[in-house]
Amino acid sequence: MKLLLISANAGAGHIRAAAALEEAARELHPKAEVRNVDILSFTDPIYRRAYANSWLKMADNAPALWGYIYSSSDAAKAKKKQAAVIRAFDRIEFRKFRRFVADFAPDVVLCTHFLPGQVLATSRKEPWGRFRFGCVLTDFDAHVLWAQPSFDRFFVGNEELVEVLADKGMERGKIAVTGIPIVKAFAQPMQRKAAREKLGLRDDAPVVLCMGGGMGLGNMDAIVESVIQQPPVQVLAVAGKNAKLKKDIEALTVPRGSELRVFGFVNNIPEMMAAADLAVTKSGGLSSSECLATGLPMLVPNPIPGQEERNADYLAEIGAGFKARGQGSFAYKLRRLLGEPELRLQMAKNARRAGKPGAAAAVIRAMLG
C-alpha cells in the first residue's frame, strides 16, 4: 500500500493537517509506504513564494480586500476562471510534481489543500492517475475552490459543510464528517494541574494563551497588552516565527498582579492549551480544532474576513468561542470571560462536545481501511 499525502505551504494549517494524517497512517498502517509532500516545493521559487505569501500579506495588511476577494470569488463561475489559470501554469509549474506522482505510483492520495485536485484533474484517466483521491478541508467553511470533481472523497469538519459542498455541485455520498485532522497529542491532553505544574504556573489566577499563528500575524502585541491589563492574569504569549513581534511583546510593561511569558516558535502547544483557561487567538481551522479537542474556550479578536471569520462564526454558534470586533468589544468580552468562571466552564463543555480529536484516524480508516 502506497499513501501520498499532499499539502501546500500556503498557511500552516494545511501542513499541520497533513502531519496529523501521516502520524495516524503510520500508526494504523505501519507497513504502508507513506510520503508527505508540499506541492509548492516542486515549483519555481518565485511562483512558490508568490502563491504561498500573497494571501498571508493581504490578509494581514488589507483584510477588507482579502474578505472581498474571498466572498466574491466563492461562486460557480470562479471555478472556471481558476481552472483556466491552472491549465496555463500546469505544463510549466507542475510538470515536475506530476512526474513525481507518476513515479511514486500511489494507491491512495490524500490532500489537505485544493490545489492538487486542480493540478491532477487532467491526469485522472492516465494509468498512473487511477488512485483513490481524497480531500480534507482544513476550515469550517468550504470555498468553491475546494469543490473539485476530481476528488473521490471529501472529509469535512461539521455537518453543515456537507450541504455547502453539495450546493457547489459535489455528491453528498462522497462527503464524510470526520472533523479536521489534528495530531494525537491534542486527543490526549495533560491534566490542567499537571500542565500548570510543569510550566510553573499558579492556581490562583486564570491563564490566558495568546497566539497569532505560526507567523505571528495580527496586532498581537496590542492584544497581549490588553490582556495583561486585567490582573490577576497569567499570559502565555506565543509569537511564532515573528522575531520582531516577540521583541515587541517582551518590551510591554506588565502591571502588578499579572505575569507575562513570551515565546517564539514552540512545540508544546498541547501542554499550554491544557494549562490555559482561555485562548485568545486567530480562528484558523487547525487552531480552532485543537482548542475544541482540548475543551479550551476561545476569544477571537478581529477575525480576518474570509475563512477565519467563518470559523469564528462557527465557534460562536456552538457556544465555544466569542468573536470581538474592535477594542471595546474585545475588552468587554475579555472581562466577562476572565470574571465568569462558570461561563468558561460551559464553553469548555461545548467545545469538547463539538471536538473531534480522532479526525485523522477517521480519515485514514475511510481511505485505507
Image: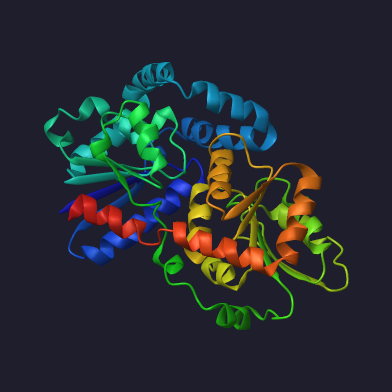
Residue 347 horizontal side relative to residue 98, left or right: right
Using the image, determine if residue 31 lies above or below residue 44: below
Residue 233 appears anywhere in the view: yes
Which of these two is toward me, 138 or 30?
138
The location of residue 78, given as percent across then percent down, is 43, 19
Quadrant in which the C terminus is drawn = bottom left
The location of residue 300, given as percent across then percent down, is 65, 49
Q: In which quarter of the view is residue 277 placed?
A: bottom right
Identify the residue at horizontal 31%, vertical 23% (top origin).
91
Identify the residue at horizontal 27%, vertical 59% (top origin).
25
Identify the residue at horizontal 60%, vertical 67% (top origin).
345
Residue 35 horizontal side relative to residue 282, left or right: left
Quadrant in which the N terminus is drawn = bottom left
Specify how the rendered protein is coloured: rainbow
The location of residue 154, given as percent across then percent down, is 30, 41
Q: In which quarter of the view is residue 53 placed?
A: top right
